[in-house]
Image: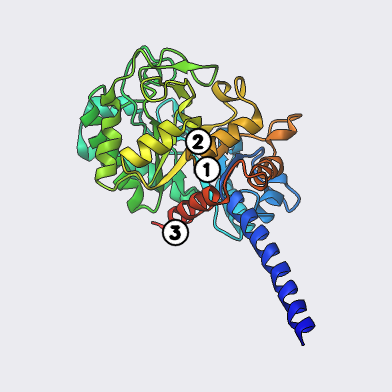
Amino acid sequence: MKKIILLFSLIWQYHLSFAQIDSLDIQIGQMIMVGMSGHSVSANSPIITAIKKQHIGGVLLFELNLNPVQTEQKLSKLTNDLQDAASIPLLISIDQEGGKVNRLKTKYGFVDMPSAKFIGTKNDDMYTRETGVNTAQTLQRCGININFAPVLDVDNPACPVLGKLQRCYSADVEKIAHIASIIMDAHQEQGIKTVVKHFPGHGNSKTDSHKGLADVSKHWTKDELVPYKNLIAEGKIQALMTAHIINRNIDPSGLPATLSKKVVNNLLRNTMGYKGVVFSDDMQMHAISKYYGFEESIKKAINAGVDILIFSNNIANAKWYTAENIHATIKKLVLKNEIKAERIKESYDRIMALKHSR
């Protein structure tokens, strides 16, 4: 009898161990968002394989994913096909700020979407709301459920990647928060989630983090946190994106914000009380990929408190950027105890809460 009980005990432990591994695999997959190639997918497409294996929880779309013919209809089919392959609904995202950062252009038949600078200069709440509704309704029709907007950075025309491109509403931090709040409400009413960016403030940078290191330490001011503080206090922020900027005022070590526990965990979560999802900016931007190894950057970002890592595209001949390798790398780090399983579970719980929210 004792042998039978022992046998059942061993079988049950064996079952539990595999259940835990499966659970870990799913949790890790929800933390990964990747870009894809092409206008359509088939059963054998790499992105569909990754979705079915639950190695990713989200897809990032770009203009390169738009078919120039019958664009809205075919984009809607693409997003439906992606969702059909998923056991857990995907976050299907896009950068649709308007103005220069505008994937869904009028040449494809979409409504004109003005720049943030234009909206801020016009300074008309009714117009701001109408713009937000138009944007959100367009995304909803296309099957896109999350927008990497609005931008909360301060407007500085000297910033090559933000102010120069008219991506910011204003230099007035209270005005930024007010306009962003209207845009976010308009999106939420249409069932579209928003991701504010770029924490803790990229607007005064003098260089482009897409191309290399961007250090804002000499130019950043604490006022740049005000839009985040206001919107966190109002419970408006559903998700937030970090900047790949160095800010020694917050982290004297010089780690980029995305990789910094002092920025994400200590300042954003502990001091400012933010409890929602944190996205990285694209981990393939040169501010990260040129100066930090693939595995090191993943480990630092997750341990800093980032919940979803974005890799914009599976680059040809760079196998480490495939969904499978990103997933395997995170799992290896967990099994080696270099990332705690509890840290993965924290992110998974936040992501699932976001996915189930309106």
Quadrant of the rendered structure where residue 26 is? bottom right
C-alpha separation, residue under disc 3 versus residue under disc 2: 21 Å
For the residues labelled 1 and 3, say whether their Cβ atoms are less than 8 Å apart: no
Q: Horizontal and vertical percent for residue 124? A: 20, 34
Residue at 64 percent of width and 41 percent of height: 39
Query: Which residue is label 3 attached to?
Result: 356
Relative horizontal placement of residue 292, taking residue 280 as reference (left or right):
right
The residue lying toward the viewer, choosing from 318 and 245, is: 245
Q: Secondary structure at mark 2?
A: strand
Residue 142 seen by the camera: yes
Tell me the amino acid under the disc marked 2.
Answer: Ser
Q: Horizontal and vertical percent for residue 80? A: 58, 54
The residue lying toward the viewer, choosing from 219 and 80, is: 219
Tell me the amino acid under the disc marked 3.
Answer: His
Quadrant for the N terminus in the image:
bottom right
Query: Which residue is label 1 attached to?
Result: 308
Task: Give the class, few, some or many, for how many residues have Cα within 10 Å of label 3's Cα (few <14, many ≥20).
Answer: few
Q: Horizontal and vertical percent for residue 237? A: 34, 44
Residue at 70 percent of width and 69 percent of height: 13
C-alpha separation, residue under disc 1 versus residue under disc 3: 16 Å
Which label was assigned to residue 66?
none
Q: Horizontal and vertical percent for residue 101? A: 45, 28
For the residues labelled 1 and 2, say whether their Cβ atoms are less than 8 Å apart: yes
- Residue farthest along the bottom direction in this orientation: 1
Q: Secondary structure at mark 1?
A: strand
Quadrant for the C terminus in the image:
bottom left
Q: Earlier in the sequence, mark 1 or mark 2?
A: 2
Relative horizontal placement of residue 228, taking residue 350 as reference (left or right):
left
Task: Give the class, few, some or many, for how many residues have Cα within 10 Å of label 1's Cα (few <14, many ≥20).
Answer: many
Label count reads 3
Residue 149 seen by the camera: no
Query: Which residue is label 2 attached to?
Result: 280
